[in-house]
Amino acid sequence: MDFIRYAERAASLVNADLADETALHEHLADRSWLHRSVAPGDVASLQAFQSDLRPVFEASDVDDVPLVVSQLNDLLAAHPVTPMISDHDPDNLHMHVANRAASVAELLVGEALMGLANLVCDLGATRLGTCSEARCDHVYVDTSPNQSRRYCSDRCSSRANVAAFRARQKAASAS
């Protein structure tokens, strides 16, 4: 089980605009085998989970470790994960975070929670954040060695740097 990838998928899930089943299919573009399993209730379940999960990233962003831990524990209690050994590739046995009967929503929630819980335990509870670019509200997972990530993407980082450069130029020309 790749917990870092699951944690990054959790951030992607929070950032996703899941307006309807089509949007969920787009979110799952790299996992097309899940498309046929999407059920009508999955979108509503995932929208609710997005709202519940965002505060974990926000608490981590302000270094509130006890709140990160308690929120994740509350979510784990509300959404029990049922890990199982997957044998669909007998030469590569590995763990899945939901049983075969799980809905797409249950699978994505389980992956998100296990990924974030393991990331918090392995790397620390302050490795999650909200984008520092003023016009963006996305979240991210910081796996950098020196915990220096502040933006959700290179695009936002560039926008913030360009804005800061222009502000300095404007200030210099005004003096």
Image: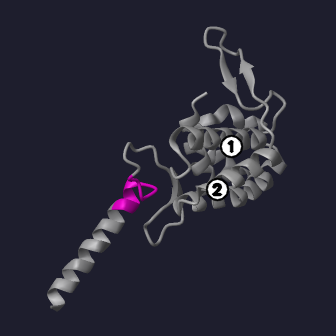
Between 10 and 26, the one nearer to me in the picture: 10
The residue lying at 27 percent from left, 79 percent from top is 167
Q: Which residues are magenta?
A: 148-157
Q: Quadrant of the C terminus?
A: bottom left
Q: Residues within 10 Å of mark 1 (few under 14, many from 20)?
A: many
Residue at far bottom of view: 175
Residue 78 in percent (x, y) is at 82, 48
Q: Residue tagged by mark 2?
A: 66
Left or right: 7 with respect to 172? right
The residue lying at 62 percent from left, 35 percent from top is 31
Residue 64 in percent (x, y) is at 58, 60
Q: Secondary structure at mark 1?
A: helix
Measure the C-alpha gap from mark 1 to mark 2. Answer: 17 Å
The residue lying at 47 percent from left, 72 percent from top is 135
The label number, if any, that marks residue 113 in the structure image? 1
**Above-or-below relation of 9 to 68:** above
Q: Residues within 10 Å of mark 2 (few under 14, many from 20)?
A: few
**Above-or-below relation of 69 to 82:** below
Magenta includes 149?
yes
Q: Amino acid at mark 2?
A: Pro
Residue 56 in percent (x, y) is at 63, 56
Q: Amino acid at mark 1?
A: Leu
Is tag 1's residue or tag 2's residue first in the polypeptide sequence?
2
Residue 118 in percent (x, y) is at 61, 38
